[in-house]
Image (spheres, helix red, strand yellow):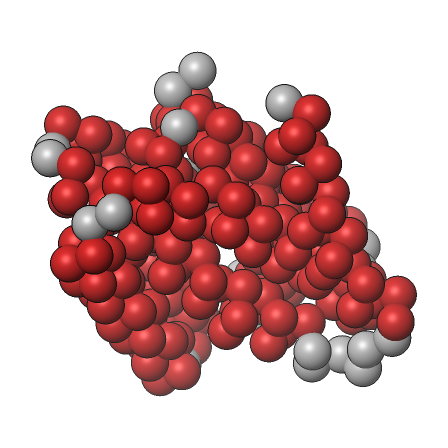
Amino acid sequence: MSALAYTIIPVAAVIVGAIVSLLRTPGARFISAMQHLAAGVVFAAAATEILPQIKHDAAPVATLVGGTVGVATMLLLKALEERATGSLAMIGAVAIDILVDGLVLGLAFLAGEKAGILLTIALTLEVLFLGLTLTSDLRKSLRAAWKVVAVVAAIGLLLPLGAVLATPVATLSQPIIVAFLSFGLMALLYLVTEELLVDAHECPDSPLVTGMFFAGFLGLLIFEELM
């Protein structure tokens, strides 16, 4: 399967998240636990697949340039999200975030099919709960349930678009590929530290909730070894 085909899974997940949120909004503690779980899975995918590939290719200049651009891009997205007011601005900020996720997923497949599969699992968990939270916000401005699902689905389709944008990178020279992988690595680390875990800590922690991060990390490590 190609990277584009695998994006069907997270796209379906974000739609499922929207529908579930319309039927019954999950509790804050449950969402926090699942965000911890998703953060652990994303971190494991980045550490075990993307980082080793970057180190293996040993292109320090490309790593520095790609990583710097990645950090700058994510900080810019953060600034845009903080300034976003109203439903339209919020939709735009989330749409850009999803597009970057798709780009990173496409880049992960450059490191190998196993890396792409593991990141597909990680991003599926992430966008599932993004669908939950986005739907809750959209219900305030969009009364009709079908409109909410349609908007969330349209945003989810930016994942395949991002993956398609990453496809031509495979034809470039190895140092440039490393630069793009470094970009993707920084985006994933930002996702874990500044989005998933920050949102998860809005709810009071408990040992069980915190432990979900490590459950996600270990779970993906075991899954990788079984592959």
In the picture, measured across the screen, residue 38 lies left or right of residue 70, that is: right
In the picture, measured across the screen, residue 214 lies left or right of residue 73, that is: right
Q: Residue at x 34, y 48 (%)?
A: 55
Residue 142 point in image, percent of width and height = 54, 61
* 52 shown above or below 33: above
**Relative depth, front residue between 28 and 225:** 225
**Relative depth, front residue between 51 and 135:** 51
Residue 168 point in image, percent of width and height = 16, 31
Figure disc tally: 0
- Looking at the figure, which quarter contains the N terminus? top left
Q: Residue at x 69, y 25 (%)?
A: 226
Q: Is residue 162 visible?
A: no
The quarter holding residue 167 reads top left
In the picture, measured across the screen, residue 161 lies left or right of residue 22, that is: left
* 174 shown above or below 72: above
Q: Residue furthest left?
A: 173
Residue 17 point in image, percent of width and height = 65, 47
Residue 86 point in image, percent of width and height = 43, 77
Q: Residue at x 38, y 59 (%)?
A: 187
The quarter holding residue 93 reads bottom left
* 217 shown above or below 160: below
- Looking at the figure, which quarter contains the C terminus? top right
In the picture, measured across the screen, residue 186 lies left or right of residue 136, that is: left
Q: Residue at x 20, y 49 (%)?
A: 59
Q: Residue furthest top?
A: 1
Q: Is residue 157 visible?
A: yes
